[in-house]
Amino acid sequence: MSKEKILVIGANGQIGTALTQSLRQKYGTANVIASDLNTPLRSVIGIFEKLDVLDIERLRAIVLKYGINQIYHLAAILSAKGEQNPRQTWDVNMNALWNVLEIARQEHISKVYYPSTIAVFGPQTPKENCPQFTTMHPSTIYGISKQAGEQLCEYYFRRFGLDVRSLRYPGIISHESLPGGGTTDYAVDIFYKAVDGLAYECFLSQNTRLPMMYIDDAIRATIELMEAPKEKIKNRYGYNLQGVSFSPTDLAAEIQKQLPNFSISYKPDFRQAIADSWVCSLDDSAAKEDWGWEAKFDLARICTEMLTNLQARKSDRHNEYNEMTFL
Ligand code: NAD
Ligand code: AKB
């Protein structure tokens, strides 16, 4: 019987949907409480609580009600959406984190997970094999808030001994849950078009190479980091995480190996400047050395997984896709 009682905040999102499922398989459905602003679109077995994490007393009430001892705090506004309302993005990304860390400190939560991102890097950062510790200077409000969030997590660890752990995710590619307004969303959208036999117009230019990762790798990394013995966690900012780096052209070529009639065109919009400010690949040797991280999905395997799964779910995924919030 698991002793863990886990709260996932932002559980309806692209990562939260998959992470909640995996945590429930591992720790038992009743031990993982999902929460988000609204009830999930698809009904899922397990406890769900409505929570605006900006409401600190509601957060405390949920923590006390279930005897929560671990929090995975995923709620955030991502890079592209963030530029549409910088003030709100700062409020959600920073004040929510502050609430989570404060409740964790006050209510003696044993572990907190905070997802960071490649958006913490900026135009002055080395583009290839980006080091763990380097010049950052992010240029989006999302990146600025996430970098400040990393600092706040490290502060809570150093000042209060809170066991808070973090990863810098690349762009995440998934088929079960949809992305929520990022710059890397094209690498999911493209598969929906390809499977439906449609051409894809990409909002990034053809050679924009970015770090990406398949959802299974991202979820495994998250759980491995959270389960690693405390003495192995030597970095309380975010660990760099490298999966696979590719451009829209590389991705289209890989899809064409399986769907030769698929075609892509390019019409870069404001997201191009965001992508240009990010790095192309990361040095994740610290994650490998400290807690044994290793990516498993290369580009070919990601394409096969995405195309096969989206084909198989063609009828039910159409409803979701129509509700999708690609910008
Ligand atoms: P998402 O946009 O798909 O989901 C975020 C969820 O948070 C949504 O369901 C939303 O309703 C919820 N939320 C927003 N404001 C809230 C609030 N005030 N209270 C409670 N819930 C709220 O995001 P995602 O892609 O699942 O990302 C999860 C985390 O991972 C984020 O912190 C993001 O910065 C980070 N991340 C994601 C990626 C990626 O490619 N998906 C890459 C790097 C980092
Ligand atoms: C985004 O594009 O904003 C996210 C991220 C890399 O953090 N996918």
Image (spheres, rainbow, N blue to C red):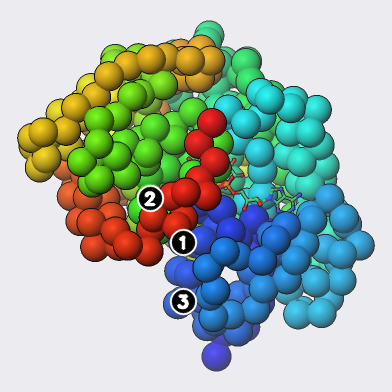
Q: Is residue 172 above or below residue 56?
A: above
Q: Is residue 91 left or right of residue 264?
A: right
Check contact, mark 1 vs mark 2: CB within 8 A: yes
Between disc 2 and disc 3, whose residue precedes?
3
Of the two numbered discs 1 and 3 in the rendering, the one whose residue sits closer to the viewer: 1
State whether label 2 is within 8 Å of ligand 1: yes
Q: Nearer the viewer, residue 9 or 113?
A: 9
Which three-letter amino acid code belongs to the residue tagged 1?
A: Ala
Report the quarter where the C terminus lies: top right
Q: Is residue 223 left or right of residue 87?
A: left
Q: Residue at x 25, y 45 (%)?
A: 196
Q: Which residue in the protein does label 2 denote?
A: 174
Q: Residue at x 15, y 29 (%)?
A: 253
| Residue 18, numbered label | 1
Of the two numbered discs 2 and 3 in the rendering, the one whose residue sits closer to the viewer: 2
Q: Nearer the viewer, residue 116 or 263?
A: 263
